[in-house]
Amino acid sequence: MGTPVHTPSGGPSLLTERGPMEPVREMEFTAHFARADGECAAEAAAVEVTRVIDAPPSFVAPVLDAGRSASKCLLARSAADTCRIVLTADLTGITVAATDDVKVSLDSCDQAGARNLPLLAVVDGLNVHHGPDGHVWVVWKGSWRRVDAT
């Protein structure tokens, strides 16, 4: 994926409820949190990554809920000192992942992130993956709103 794309402050949004704005095809936003700070820090990280979406609350709320649920699920399965919330957006949809893998981006290459990891479990609609190096990925995938044909 390369360098993450960040929405410039005061500039136009690059991410709406209908997907990334052209010419952007994919982007990633990450917020780290300390495990010692628990669910409060995880929720703050989830809020931070969802702030990049310029969309009504009816769209953002389920994405934020997914971030909360994914981080809670991760905290129950990992003892890592530092974790992160990763929001990835591309033309196919929006993905929220909580992981204790703080070095590798979600889609940086075929062998990295959760994309090609075996599915260990499905917990409340979240896919839980374990990597060969012991990292845990808890992933939620959502769809963009479609533009009406009217």
Image: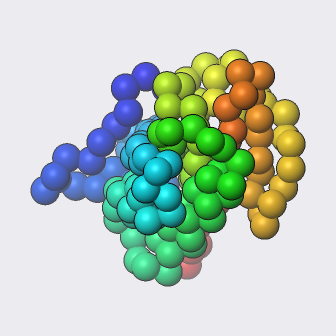
Q: Position of residue 97 (x, y in %)?
A: 59, 48
Q: Count of labels shown?
A: 0
Colour theme: rainbow
Residue 147 sits above or below residue 91 on the image: below
Q: Position of residue 24 (x, y in %)?
A: 40, 39
Residue at image point 62% right, 61% down: 72
Q: Judge from the rendering whether residue 121 lies leftward or rightward of residue 69; answer left or right.
A: right
Q: Judge from the rendering whether residue 96 lies leftward or rightward of residue 9; answer left or right.
A: right
Which sits in the foreground, 58 or 150? 58
Residue at image point 68% right, 55% down: 76
Q: Is residue 141 visible?
A: no
Q: Position of residue 67 (x, y in %)?
A: 55, 60
Residue at image point 58% right, 56% down: 71
Residue at image point 49% right, 58% down: 38
Residue 150 sits above or below residue 66 on the image: below
Q: Judge from the rendering whether residue 121 lies leftward or rightward of residue 66; answer left or right.
A: right
Residue 147 sits above or below residue 111 on the image: below
Q: Judge from the rendering whether residue 35 lies leftward or rightward of residue 127; answer left or right.
A: left
Q: Is residue 118 visible?
A: yes
The residue furthest left is 10
Please identify the quadrant where the C terminus is shown. bottom right
Which sits in the foreground, 150 or 16? 16
Which sits in the foreground, 55 or 97? 97
Q: Position of residue 32 (x, y in %)?
A: 41, 44
